[in-house]
Amino acid sequence: MTGTMAGMLGFAAVLALIALRVPVAIAMGVVGAIGYGLVFDWSTLGFVLGRAPFESVYPDSLTVVPLFILMGVFAAYGGLSRSLYNLVTAAIGHWRGGLAMATVGACAVFGAVCGSAIATAATMGRVAMPEMRRMGYDDRLATASVAAGGTLGVMIPPSILFVIYGLMTEQSIGKLFAAGVLPGILGMLLYMAAIRWWTGRRPELGRPAPPAAGIERRRALVQVWPVLVLFGVVLGGMYAGFFSPTEAAGVGAFGAVVISWLAGRMPRAEFFRAVQETATTTGMIFMILIGAGIFNYFISATGLTDQLIQAVRDTGLSPWTVMVLLMVMYFILGALMDELAMVLLTVGPVFKLVVALGFDPIWFGVMLVTVCEIGMILPPVGINLFVIQSVANVPLATVVRGISPFVAADTIRLVILALVPALATWLPGRMSG
Amino acid sequence: MAGVAVLMVDISTRKTIGFSILGTIDLMQLAQVTCVFLVLPLVFLRESHVAVDFITERFPSRLQAIVHAVAALLGIALLGAILWYSWGQAAIQLRQGDRSVTLGIPMAFYWAPLLLGTCLSIFASVVVLFRAFGKR
């Protein structure tokens, strides 16, 4: 059996195990270990299993992961979402479909302090769903707007997916964060346009809320300024070269804890729950990193990546055709598995292929995260669909029936990013340092 | 949280009076290794892993329990192998007297959470295995 064939079989075996509910980390680790032994050498497998777990956790570059998780969890537990929602609702809630648009807008701003789509959707869902229901919004529009808006959390910096992509491909995390800003704003605007279009055709889905008084708007702005300052310090500090990503993450985590504490929104029980959630989320992500570390030893041993690049060159397909095929592959994978696992499983060989074809690695990171966002709201395993189903206590079918305008909006964004790569590359190109 | 505290003190002193805390990276790495590996047993016990269940949830409950148990067994096998071979790697570093770059912390301190956490994760997986059998 050739190395390429073994590598392909390895991917198939991982997917088969994942389909049988074997945790992604275990599936990658088991297949990686057995595959390495079969393809390369059983006698050195001990070295791989002895080193890979330590190497997957020890590097100081990974410190940024738990710190940004801490920042996001404390932002979620600290009630910062309520202030954001009040502010955006006060501004646009009186439009047709305005509360759904405000939900998307608040998700985008909350995504600026929280790098997780799940946390963003769950947090904003708890705040926005009662309000939209009170105003008689249709559950399909209400739930789908939260599910889709939540995905902005992984595009708008800080983003755990960008961090993982940057670490796996040795790209600057700061530049990736900067690259996500404009596509994130574009995503927010397209989601709002989708809501506008939908409520234009079916006004009964989301009627305008009464306009907010001037004093309400000012009060909302006063409540929200610490969040905006935190975002400005974290991203601005990185963009200006004042902070490294790890330092920015540390400042962000510290800031989120302090803001929550000063606002009196963090009783002791909530504090410990937030710490516990940070720890388990960190452990879960690092366990996948350990599994991916073992699997990557196997993929390196097969030489799959180089042969894949050569095989693609031999087909004579244009780089853009290959890119479209890759995006289709990610669409399918995203609908079937967790996005973080999908990135960790595939990004090694795919990244080298993409770079060999002449694409910008930062731009590809943005494309990849955009497809991940789509995967998060695509049935059957779009994670945000389940999050909102649970938060709103509605049948999954209700959320799924409302999601298609948002998937269409994301697909349009993907096409725009392909046609105008500068949307992703312009800001990173102007960064200091 | 301890890591955040060390990092914040380092940043504030470095950016204001130009004084950097010696060995911040060593301490952050130690905090990270300790936090990650000591929380892994909880991840295994609560089954907080990323897993896909939209296919297996259509299985009959008996088959679901078997699949669940097989997943736990695979986890135990992988963790067992990791523990066995990591023990060997840790012993080598201990014999060689390896230390961290700046503060000279013995590397055994970094390996200890890995070994302890992996060992406890195996016990957690055994609990999950019995739970799976209990469902049958």
Image: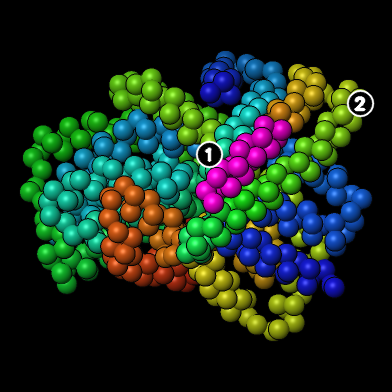
The one nearer the camera, A232 or A333, is A333
A23 relative position to A379: left or right: right
The image's mark for residue B46 is 1
Q: Secondary structure at mark 1?
A: loop
Q: Please tell me whether the stretch drawn in magenta is mainly helix, strand or loop.
A: helix
Residue A158 shown in magenta: no
Place residue A198 in its image quadrant: bottom left
Horizontal relation, residue A15 to residue A381: left or right: right
The quarter of the image holding the N terminus of chain A is bottom right
Q: From the viewer's perspective, is residue A290 above or below residue A78? A: below
Magenta range is B118-136
Nearest the viewer among A33 and A345 is A33
Question: With A241 as the anchor, is A45 left or right in this view?
Answer: right
The relative height of residue A272 versus residue B41 in the rendered view (above or below) is above
Rendered residue at 16%/34% (across/down): A218
**Camera-nearest residue between A166 and A392:** A392
**Which chain is disc 2 placed on?**
B
Label 2 or label 1, whichever comes before in sequence order: 1
Chain of the residue displaying label 1: B
Q: Is residue A253 at least partly visible in the picture?
A: no
x, y percent for residue B52: 53, 57
Within the image, what quadrant is residue A16 found in? bottom right
Give the residue number, with chain letter if any, for mark 2.
B96
Q: Amino acid at mark 1?
A: Arg
Q: Is residue A88 above or below residue A17?
A: above
Q: Residues within 10 Å of mark 2 (few under 14, many from 20)?
A: few
Number of numbered discs on residues:
2
The image shows residue A283 at horizontal and vertical percentages of 59, 38
Name the amino acid type tagged 2: Gln
- Secondary structure type for disc 2: helix
Look at 36% across and 70% down and name the residue there: A408
